Image: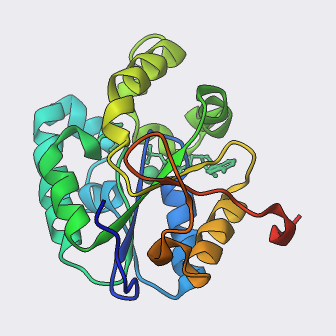
Amino acid sequence: MDMMDNLLGKNIVLIDFMGVGKTTVGNLLSKKLGRGFFDCDDIIMERCAMKIKDIFKIYGEKYFREMEKGVLAELSERKGVVIATGGGAVLNPENIEKLKINGLLVRLKASPWKIMSNISGYAESQSCDSRPLLDEGDKLGNMLRLMHEREGLYRCCHYELFTDPFSAEEVSAIITQYLSEGHFSKKRSKESKYHGYSIEPNHSWLPF
Ligand SMILES: Nc1ncnc2c1ncn2[C@@H]1O[C@H](COP(=O)(O)OP(=O)(O)OP(=O)(O)O)[C@@H](O)[C@H]1O
Ligand SMILES: O=C(O)C1=C[C@@H](O)[C@@H](O)[C@H](O)C1
Ligand SMILES: [Mg+2]
């Protein structure tokens, strides 16, 4: 695998399923690192002046995916920023190819029960407007089916971190620590059974 030597100009790109925490962690991480933060879903909503669920309802998923492809292509051109992708970014291999040109792709992996817990009560929050694919019928069933369909695609990332035991703040601290200690560039993480490397946090420095 092609690993980066100098990460300063590299984008940190957060990938994986809806509700794993890409937006929340991305925000925290960008502040810790003093980098700009861009959230693909937010940019799409801003440009369409519509909620994602309405874009899906009125224009359809295909239209949304074209918007997503355009926004991700633009974000791929940036340097040294943090990017939160939407959960479906991996569906188009072109998106991933472009994001990889100048990006370190970090998978925030979570179990279905962690995701359910993350998004529980989201009907009352604004985020229920951004996950229409979970909302038709049985939410847990939809989630398990989509996770299963996409599992192989999410393995495209350079690194993955299993986030179940951690808060969003801790996840962002782990990634910051990994960057500052040069683990990403020095390939010191344990090679995972997939294509990339698994991030294995050292609990001693975690802010408990
Ligand atoms: N590690 C975590 N532990 C507990 N809660 C978390 C964690 N990460 C995120 N959350 C919470 O889970 C919810 C969903 O997070 P967020 O919106 O960041 O997910 P996302 O991956 O961006 O989802 P989407 O792909 O739909 O945009 C938020 O309420 C957030 O505060
Ligand atoms: O996983 C998906 O396909 C999606 C995830 C969200 O982030 C949004 O991009 C949209 O709801 C589609
Ligand atoms: Mg998000």
Residue 155: give x, y in percent of width and height. 37, 42
**For residue 104, side relative to residue 32 (left or right):** left
Which colour assignment does the render follow?
Answer: rainbow
Residue 52: give x, y in percent of width and height. 31, 43
**Front residue of this view, candidates 171 and 125:** 171
Which of the 4 image quadrants contains residue 180? bottom right
**For residue 13, side relative to residue 162 (left or right):** left
Residue 127: give x, y in percent of width and height. 49, 44
In percent of the image, x 11 and y 40: which residue is there? 63
Which of the 4 image quadrants contains residue 5? bottom left
Tell me: residue 36, above or below residue 115. Answer: below
Tell me: residue 177, above or below residue 35. Answer: above
Residue 167: give x, y in percent of width and height. 73, 54
In percent of the image, x 66 and y 27: which residue is there? 113
Which of the 4 image quadrants contains residue 18? top left
Q: The N terminus lies in which quarter of the figure?
A: bottom left
In percent of the image, x 16 and y 62: which residue is there? 98
How many circles with numbers are drawn on the protein?
0
In percent of the image, x 70 and y 60: which residue is there? 201
- Would you say residue 197 is visible in this rendering? yes
